[in-house]
Each structure stands twice: as C-alpha cells, then as structure tokens.
Amino acid sequence: MSRRGTVEKKAVKSDPIYRNRLVNMLIRRIMKHGKKSLAYQILYQAMKRIKQKTKKNPLSVLRQAIRGVTPDIVVKARRVGGSTHQVPIEIGSTQGKALAIRWLLTASRKRPGRNMAFKLSSELLDAVKRSGDAIRKKEETHRMAEANKAFAHFRQSIHEQG
C-alpha cells in the first residue's frame, strides 16, 4: 500500500479517426517499441477489413468483441496458512476491458496468417461469433473461478492484509 495517497486516474485520450477511447486503449496495447504510427496502421487496416467483411460499423463490432471477451470474475493467488489458493475476485469494468484487450491481442499474435492487421480482424470477428482463443481464455478463467468458489471467503482477508 502506498503511503502517499491514491493515484488519480489519467484520462485516456481518444484516437484521431474514430474519436474513441477504447480504440486508443487498443492502439497503446498493440504498440511495440514506441512505434505508435505502426500500431495506428495495423488497427485501421483491421477495421477496414472488418467493414468490408461484415458491412457493419467496425467500431460497434470492436465494442461487441471486447464486451464478449471481458471477464466478470478472475482468480487471484492468495497465500493462506502456508498454501496458495486461487481466490475468485470480481473485477471492475476498466480492468476487465484491459484484460479483454490483452487477451485479444495475445490470441491474434498467436494466429497463423499474413500480417497483424489480418490476424487482429480475424480474432475480433471470431470474438463476435463467440469463438476464438480470446473467448476460450475468458471461459477458462470463469471455469477456474467456478471451481475455486470454495475459497471465495478468503476475499475479505485480502483487503485487511493490504
């Protein structure tokens, strides 16, 4: 725990084309080695491909995909009396979105394919259809939380220990 007080949340700016914060969050996670312009290119190509394939607004497809992958509950390792338990913890929307974005990008990087834009658009479309690696990861997390529901009473002790 910090002794200096709480950190105020930084306002996430929106991107230049879609004017959306979610898109900007995604771009910052795509970016490697500070190459933001390349991250913009990748995302905008993926969005263009989604628009061509579905004939829908790519922003709504992106929102739907992220909403589908966002977990409600995660497991956190908690050490209690010499043994480590996986304790299910409900998470907030911001943290859930961050996890969903991370899972989508990890899944799209693993995919075989031509380039990152192609792989990302395919993964987003799969997430909308409720298939793909990112959705599998969410379901796996929910299953783990369900299996470890017996340790949910350790949740209270997390806040007390700090």
Image (spheres, grey):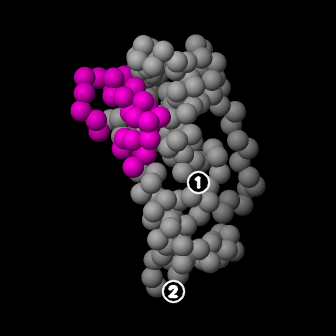
- Secondary structure mainly formed by the magenta segment: helix
Can residue 129 be seen at all in this image of the molecule?
Answer: yes
For the point 45% across and 65% down, the residue is: 144
Can residue 38 be seen at all in this image of the molecule?
Answer: no
Q: Point out the tag, 1 or 2, that comes first from the N-terminus.
A: 1
For the point 40% across and 26% down, the residue is: 121
For the point 42% across and 57% down, the residue is: 140
Question: Where is 82 relative to 155, above or below?
Answer: below
**Residue at the disc numbered 2:** 81
Residue 136 percent location from the top left of the image: 39, 49
Q: Quarter of the image containing the N terminus?
A: bottom right
- Residue 131 left/right relative to 69: left
- Residue 122 left/right relative to 88: left
Choose top left, top right, bottom left or bottom right for residue 37: top left
Q: Which segment did they paint magenta?
A: 110-136
Q: Amino acid at mark 2?
A: Gly
Disc 2 element: loop
Disc 1 element: loop
Residue 113 percent location from the top left of the image: 25, 27
Choose top left, top right, bottom left or bottom right for residue 19: top right
Residue 130 percent location from the top left of the image: 44, 41
Q: Amino acid at mark 1?
A: Asp
For the point 37% across and 22% down, the residue is: 117
